[in-house]
Image (tube, helix red, strand yellow):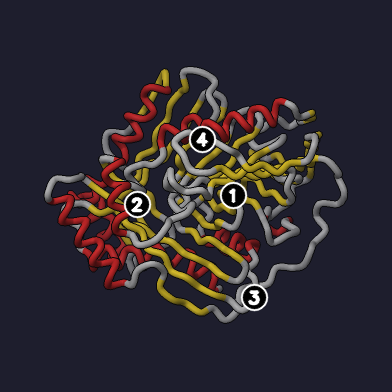
């Protein structure tokens, strides 16, 4: 594999404690922002000390991990804070498909973080004022919307075809995604979207990596030392119009055979993938309900202890792609996605997150997101398809999932 790398000649890294910066997004001086934030805590970055582009391939996570280990090993690191996310950090986003050439890792020149009542600033190289605003954030204006790869009717036809294949016994589940495209009158500032997402969805993981911006509810993996934590999400309903409607929808979701089947595929895959890596692993026997401002999900929190000091990317490689974003069996579901979706997902539904020089990190699945390129935004939404899926209901679910990024863009 040939890796495309840009980097400064030497990494000299200095982390210093700072006073609480308040809102992390408000401290970002540049629209090309890097971020991973939940409940007001996390890390943000800007500038580039190094960037790695990875072509497709089954070994892309291993190559990324090797490159980072080598890169961090040669750095001179002064980090008295020593919390997950302090010191040098790489933000990353991987393509969903192994054939995708879109995977990228970025080591920013500046990282500001807050965790467990402590805040810090990490600087690589020149420590000139990192908080000097390039220009203030400007909200997107005059958005023009149109379909992406498939119209709504064509996508429903794709869902119907997938259901037929599933009922024939070819596979148990697949996940079909749609894209929606918007064009603004001026380049879209990531900071505006991040501010709106962190304010409206504080319980989600709000992220920004190389133009991919979103707020995902799904934690693929967190590694702190030898401890790992994952959150399996599969099975979804929109929130109700009032408390009674909300409770009724949640009850229907929890008892729905279709959604419980979809969730069991995802939970069993995570168990099977993590068992060889862990000395201890706890997976709930049945899911719980996770309630977000716009959606309710079936959720299974998973915890474990790794056999050895593996990095978080080792675990990401074992888990991706989960049935929650691909289907089962994986290879058959992936082939059907390539056949029916009518688009390239790029980094949508791929792993997104960060890793530090200790191998700690947090990675989610890039859901409820958009890829921003200048004045253009490409939004994504996917739905799990099983034997009793209804194309019209799946289209309605996709529209509901689009609302997160549509509202972030529209104000």
- Mark 3 / mark 4, whichever is N-terminal: 4
Which residue position is annotated with label 2? 297
- Label 1 element class: strand
Q: Residues within 10 Å of mark 3 (few under 14, many from 20)?
A: some
Q: Are marks 1 and 3 in contact (CB under 8 Å)?
A: no
Q: Is residue 352 above or below residue 76?
A: below
Label ID, residue 262: none
In this view, the mark in front (4 or 2): 4
- Mark 4 / mark 1, whichever is N-terminal: 1
Q: In the picture provided, is 189 more to the left or to the right than 344?
A: right
The CA span between labels 1 and 2 is: 20 Å
Q: In the picture provided, is 397 more to the left or to the right than 22?
A: left
Which residue position is annotated with label 3? 186
Which residue position is annotated with label 4? 61
Q: In the picture provided, is 248 more to the left or to the right than 81?
A: left
In the rendered image, the quadrant that contains the C terminus is: bottom right
């Amino acid at each position: 594999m040939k890796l495309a790398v840009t980097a400064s000649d030497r990494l000299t890294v200095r982390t210093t404690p700072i006073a609480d910066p308040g809102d992390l997004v408000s401290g970002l001086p540049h629209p090309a922002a890097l971020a991973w934030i939940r409940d007001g805590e996390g890390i943000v970055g800007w500038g580039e000390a190094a960037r790695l582009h990875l072509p497709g391939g089954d070994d892309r996570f291993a190559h990324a991990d090797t490159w980072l280990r080598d890169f961090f090993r040669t750095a001179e690191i002064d980090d008295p804070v020593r919390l997950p996310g302090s010191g040098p950090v790489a933000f990353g986003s991987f393509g969903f498909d192994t054939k995708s050439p879109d995977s990228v890792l970025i080591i920013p020149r500046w990282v500001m973080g807050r965790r467990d009542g402590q805040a810090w600033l990490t600087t690589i190289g020149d420590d000139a004022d990192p908080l000097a605003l390039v220009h203030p954030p400007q909200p997107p204006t005059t958005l023009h919307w149109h379909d992406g790869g498939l119209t709504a009717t064509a996508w429903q036809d794709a869902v119907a075809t997938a259901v037929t294949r599933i009922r024939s016994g070819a596979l148990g589940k697949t996940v079909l995604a749609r894209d929606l495209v918007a064009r603004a009158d001026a380049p879209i500032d990531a900071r505006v979207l991040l501010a709106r997402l962190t304010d409206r969805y504080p319980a989600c993981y709000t992220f920004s990596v190389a133009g991919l911006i979103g707020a995902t509810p799904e934690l693929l993996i967190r590694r702190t030392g030898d401890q790992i934590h994952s959150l399996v999400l599969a099975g979804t309903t929109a929130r109700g119009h009032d408390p009674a409607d909300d409770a009724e929808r949640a009850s229907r979701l929890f008892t729905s055979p279709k959604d419980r089947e979809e969730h069991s595929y995802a939970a069993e895959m995570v168990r099977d993938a993590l068992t060889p890596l862990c000395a201890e692993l706890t997976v709930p026997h049945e899911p719980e309900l996770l309630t977000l401002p716009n959606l309710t999900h079936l959720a299974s929190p998973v915890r474990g202890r790794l056999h050895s000091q593996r990095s978080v990317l080792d675990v990401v490689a074992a888990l991706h792609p989960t049935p929650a974003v691909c289907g089962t069996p994986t290879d058959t579901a992936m082939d059907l996605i390539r056949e029916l979706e009518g688009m390239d997902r790029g980094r949508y539904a791929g792993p997104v997150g960060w890793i530090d020089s200790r191998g700690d990190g947090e990675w989610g699945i890039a859901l409820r997101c958009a890829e921003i390129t200048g004045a253009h935004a490409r939004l994504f939404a996917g739905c799990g398809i099983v034997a009793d899926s209804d194309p019209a209901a799946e289209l309605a679910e996709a529209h509901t999932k689009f609302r997160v990024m549509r509202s972030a863009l529209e104000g």
